[in-house]
Amino acid sequence: MVTLKTFAIYGTILYVINTIVTMAVSMLHFSQYYYPFNVGSLVVAVIFGIICFVIGAAIFYTIYDPIHNWIKGNAFLSHYIHDMFSLFWKPYLVIIIISALFGLLGMMGFGALAISVAGAYGAASVGQMLIGWVVSFAIQIGVYYWYAKTVSAKLSPYYPW
């Protein structure tokens, strides 16, 4: 029950913050007709956050022991993942860096096309996308670090490493 409650509370906060960041970054389009802030999106984020993180908590509860034993038995992984925090933080960090680099690569390809077609206007739009990418990446890293720290502190007594 503690696992479900911890995942639901902090996971929903994480999900809502990511939704707010997405809305804020989309405001970088500077369009007079575009108003991205939406209360309905926040309500949906709360509902989806609760549902998704409760399911995630149930999965975590079920597969913690096999994953824990596999990491302990693997010489490479046991060197890098040595507690509950590193179990939550390090795999996420690797995945977010790889996916952010792929996103940046795609954005640069689109940026080259936009600049060649639209010139200075294309460069401005690429600059806006790059600012949004940097802001979103930095906030996601910070918020997930907080999430991993908080959840690992709450669950470490129940799941000894």
Image (cartoon, rainbow, N blue to C red):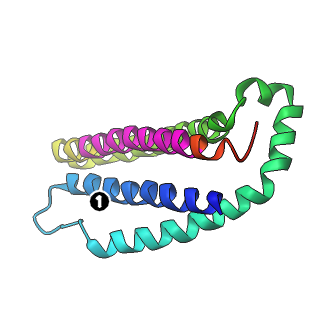
Residue 98: quarter of image: top right
Of all residues shown, which one is farthest toward the right?
73
Residue, x 32% and y 53% (percent of image)? 21
Residue 91: quarter of image: top right
Of all residues shown, which one is farthest toward the left?
32
On screen, residue 59 versus residue 35, left or right, reads: right
Looking at the picture, tell me which residue is in the foreground, 39 or 33.
39
Residue, x 78% and y 30% (percent of image)? 77
Q: Secondary structure at mark 1?
A: helix
Dividing the image into 4 quarters, which one contains the N terminus?
bottom right
Magenta-tinted stretch:
127-151
Q: Mark 1: few, some, or many residues within 10 Å (few <14, many ≥20)?
A: some
Main secondary structure type of the part rendered in magenta: helix
On screen, residue 137 versus residue 21, left or right, reads: right
Looking at the picture, tell me which residue is in the foreground, 109 or 66.
66
Dividing the image into 4 quarters, which one contains the C terminus?
top right
Looking at the picture, tell me which residue is in the foreground, 68 or 113.
68
The kind of residue on which mark 1 rests is: Met
User: In the rendering, at what x and y percent does residue 3 appear?
Assistant: 64, 57
Residue, x 46% and y 40% (percent of image)? 146
User: In the rendering, at what x and y percent does residue 11 appear?
Assistant: 51, 57
Q: Which residue is label 1 attached to?
A: 23
User: In the rendering, at what x and y percent does residue 75 appear?
Assistant: 85, 25
Indicate whether 5 appears above or below 147: below
On screen, residue 34 versus residue 154, left or right, reads: left
Looking at the picture, tell me which residue is in the foreground, 97 or 124.
97
Residue 119: within the magenta? no
Indicate whether 79 appears above or below 83: above
Residue 105 visible in the current orientation: no
Residue 115: quarter of image: top left
Residue 146: within the magenta? yes
